[in-house]
Amino acid sequence: MVIAVDSARQQLNLSRSFNELLPWLLPYDERTILCKDRSLLAVFEYHPKDQDGVAPETINVQTAALERLLLALQRSDIYLWFTHTRRKDTPPATEDRAETPEHIAALYYENYNRRTHYQHRHYLSVLIRPQEGHGKFIETFRASFEEQRGVLGSLFATLKESLGFEAMHAGIWRHIERQSAELESVMDTIESMASPLGRLDRLAHRELAGFLNHLASPTQPVPTPTSVPRYTLMDSYLGLDTLTVGEQTLEFSDGMEQKQVAVLSIKNEPDAYPEETQPGVFDALHAVDGEWTFSMALRMTDAETARNFMSSFRTFYNNTRKGILAIASETLTEKESSAVNDVADVRAEQTTKAIKSFASGNAVAAYANITVLVYGDAEKPVQDQVKKVMQALTAKNFLPLRESLHALSAWAGTLPGQWALPVRWVFLTAGPIADMIPVHGIYAGHRQNTYLSEQLNRPVPALAVLETREKASFYFNFHVGDLGHTFIPGPSRSGKSSLINFLITQWLRYPNARVFVFDKDYSNYITCILNGGAYIDYASDAGMALNPIQTLANDQDWRWFGQWSEQLLSSKNGQLSGEESQELSNAIERMKVIPEEFRHLGILGEHFTGPAAESLRNRLSVWIGNGLWAKYFSSRNDDLKFSRYTAIAMDEVLTFPVPARAFMSYIFHRIEQSLDGTPTFIYIEEAWFAFEDPIFSDRLKQWLKRLAKKNVHVVMATQSAFDSENSSAFSALIDNVSTLIFLPHERATAYTEFYRVNFQLDPYQVELLQELTPKQDYYRFLVISSG
């Protein structure tokens, strides 16, 4: 419910010092600010879920959780500021050099930087006000502090002057300590109940001062950690800009940059608000191609105050249900008139219901001040931005007002702690408040690859900066925590090759980074050659000679060969018997003494000497001599050599599942032999054969676990998954995959159950895949797993 509140405020003297607008005095401790009115202020930065990651059925659950949080904060000494900023992001800097990865990056970011991109941040500031009284405390403290007496010395002098020396021990210092304990209790309550807000980070030290300085300095697009020198008051130190009050804008300048700020408020009258609100009602601002700050300040009330306030309005509405003529007619005719003011009648009923809910102790209300700051500069004039924001607000049935006379006080009201200057306060009940709190974020990724930075002991930037549909910057990394394995399902011709080739090229910008590609349809050929890689085509005239026995160098390699050869021989006539397995093991032991240059698959049969020898030679025959699969591994030499970038054409190999399984096993073994901790990217172009083959699927699962520990991430893609009747292998591998990248799919809803069972996508997310533009849009999904 919305009820207007009139506030009589003395207008600001525009010639007064800028620091008089700032409410902050000095740090009380590393996480708390002492304000000029002796209030204590603390701030959370919170990280809400991306709006695409919130299922419609969970929205009401979130709203109910927010209402419970507000109920727990139902105290008249608590003030809250919810601040959501959308400011320009710093364009990625690149240098166009001859190397292909750098040249491609320069071309990409040249086009990327032609458009403005933004970053979103969310904050919750909490203020605990003191008890009334001690009006001269701050003035006395300020004078003493400026004489550099320090905090304790200034408090001592202030107490002596305002209370008398004998009263010092019972004075304000202990009251502030109790107030601080109350604030910490409130912050603990918020941390335990604020799940809809996502992760909470309590700001402290330089980050806390930097956030406040950012709000007071509109020319600064992002908060910068700021140190406040000792014996310096925060209101005189923070705020880097000079301020000029214009007719319709506030003009801020830091000497180099200028920023015009238009101030929009929601009128403090019921008709300025929609009759009904929906959760995330201000998400409409996300679509505005411009900079803005959304601020909702809440003056919390206790239940009794709220009930009394509502009672006064119920009386007002009851008294205005009928006009003077209707009342006169009833008096004269002694009959009830039907001429009723329907609006007042509805309002009276609403207030009656609200009063009953307050009596039950399960309702919340607060005075709210809602302000949107719109920023403009030479690139994006403020008038254009105001028009866009006004359209977004009116589309949600709000009536925004562009401030002129009250612009300065309204701007000041967006500064956490400055509750006295705003003019427009409106009385809201819990439902609308919860709907207006910004709880839907835009996931921006991480500017650095945290895992690789730790492993390499140096900062490693994000792989690429991509654009979201809201024009926010997204810093893409494969890694989520210490896991970078990724799966990309989607139909053909939807943009998979374009995305992968670009990301591979960007990966090569990392020093010494390596790439292995299992290619199909030559989709990686050009990228490989342009980057100086080695492209191996088994079907070409040059072919590729492979001799898996020749490269065995230690006991671990021989153990691998024992498993691999058993898999190889099991391809004919099924799994080996116990006797055959023992004979194979004995033959391998005998082969260890043969010089490396004489070892090849053809002579393995000569070392079968036991009762199972003939059976094993029969099994081996398809892989040597004139056997069906002899061309794959029977060479006397092994020509497989890796470069920094190695791509292998898999078209012919994948045609035959039996040799494909053995081929992939061998190549993966050789890759593992070559790993030395260098960041490595392995890409499997058509991975569905691995999922359909139960033996290889199990091996792949084990590889994924081992490779993750060696700075290797594996990216697997498939377009065949949607045509398969058996997708059970996904469940065995999903615990080892951190990231899913979904391609646009014009028939996605026909596979809703497939997406739900295998990837845990909700139906609304599947619908989103159907709306994406092929070769342009991609949907990244983080897998949350206990595996």
Image (cartoon, grey):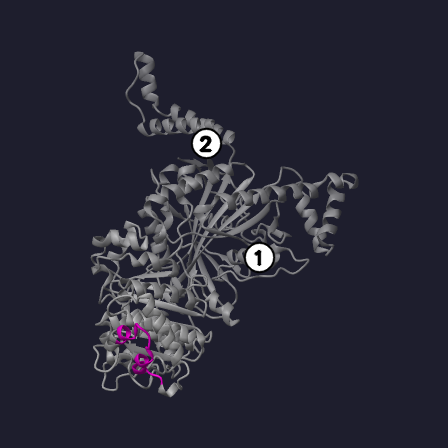
- Dot 2 and dot 1 residues touching (CB under 8 Å): no
> What's the residue at 23%, 75% (across, down)?
651
User: Looking at the magenta stretch, what is its main secondary structure?
Assistant: helix
> Is 616 placed left or right of 456 in the picture?
left
Is residue 449 visible to us here?
yes
Q: Where does the image place residue 321, in percent across and percent down from the top left?
A: 35, 24
Q: Where does the image place residue 128, in percent across and percent down from the top left?
A: 58, 42
Q: Where does the image place residue 431, in percent across and percent down from the top left?
A: 40, 38
Is residue 110 visible to us here?
no
Q: Is residue 329 magenta?
A: no
Circle 1 SS class: helix
Screen quadrant of the N terminus:
top left
The three-letter code of the residue at mark 1 reads Ala
Q: How many marks?
A: 2
Q: Where does the image place residue 639, in percent across and percent down from the top left?
A: 33, 85
> Is 491 placed left or right of 578 in the picture?
left
2 or 1: mark nearer the eye? 2
Which residues, given as a range, are shown in magenta? 599-617
Please rate how many residues cluster around mark 1, counting C-alpha atoms within 10 Å: few if below 14, some from 14 to 19, many from 20: many
> What's the residue at 46%, 43% (across, down)?
369
The three-letter code of the residue at mark 2 reads Asn
Against 689, is 97 above or below? below
Q: Nearer the viewer, residue 293 or 769?
A: 769
Mark pair 2, 1: CA separation: 37 Å
Circle 2 SS class: loop
Q: Earlier in the sequence, mark 2 or mark 1?
A: 1
Residue beneath disc 2: 362
Residue 209 is marked as 1
